[in-house]
Amino acid sequence: MDTPTPVPDTVPAALRDAVLAWYDATGRQLSFRATTDPYAVLVSELMAQQTQATRAAEAWTTWMGRFPTVEVLAQASVADVLRAWAGLG
């Protein structure tokens, strides 16, 4: 059995610093970038897969207002969820 080549677990500091500097200078301020809530991040990722990031950010704000937790989402009817998701692509 072949031994896999080890993958470095850290990014070189110069590359990391360059990417972070670029982001500071040009990164868009999108509403979903301000959260670390796993549910909110999952919703934003799913939306971003279906539509442009700026449209996803707008839809995400509306969605999170309507379904702020996975528990609230689970209690909603399928029809309500599908209506809220409509238009994302």
Image: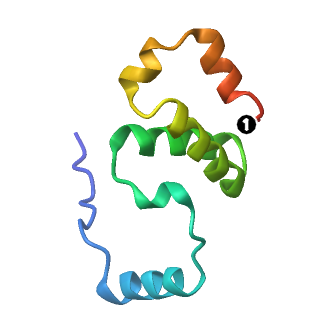
Which residue corresponds to the image point at 43% horizontal and 61% vertical from the top-left? 34
| Location of residue 41 with respect to 30 vertically, above or below | above
Q: Quadrant of residue 8?
A: bottom left
Q: Is residue 88 left or right of residue 15?
A: right
The image shows residue 55, relative to residue 19, as above or below, that is: above
Read off the residue under disc 1: 88
Question: In percent of the image, x 68 and y 40: which residue is there?
Answer: 50
Dividing the image into 4 quarters, which one contains the C terminus? Answer: top right
Q: Is residue 57 above or below residue 74?
A: below
Q: Position of residue 28 (x, y in %)?
A: 60, 71
For image coordinates 51% across by 39% down, the residue present is 64
The one of 2 and 9 positioned closer to us in this rendering: 9
Image x and y of residue 45, in percent: 52, 44
Quadrant of the rendered image containing residue 66: top right
**Label 1 neighbourhood size at 10 Å, few (<14), some (14-19), many (20+)?**
some
Query: Which one is in front, 5 or 8?
Result: 8
Quarter of the image for the N terminus: give it.
top left
Considering the numbered disc 1 on the image, is that residue within a helix, a strand or a loop? loop
**Count the marks: how many?**
1
Q: Could you say which is closer to the camera, residue 69 or residue 1?
A: 69
Amino acid under label 1? Leu
Q: Position of residue 31 (x, y in %)?
A: 53, 58
Q: Residue furthest front?
A: 65
What kind of colouring is applied to the model shown?
rainbow
x and y percentages locating residue 81 in the rendered image:
60, 20
Please give left or right for residue 31 compared with residue 68 in the image.
right
Q: Is residue 36 left or right of residue 63?
A: left
Q: Is residue 76 above or below residue 66?
A: above
Q: Residue at x 57, y 62 (%)?
A: 30
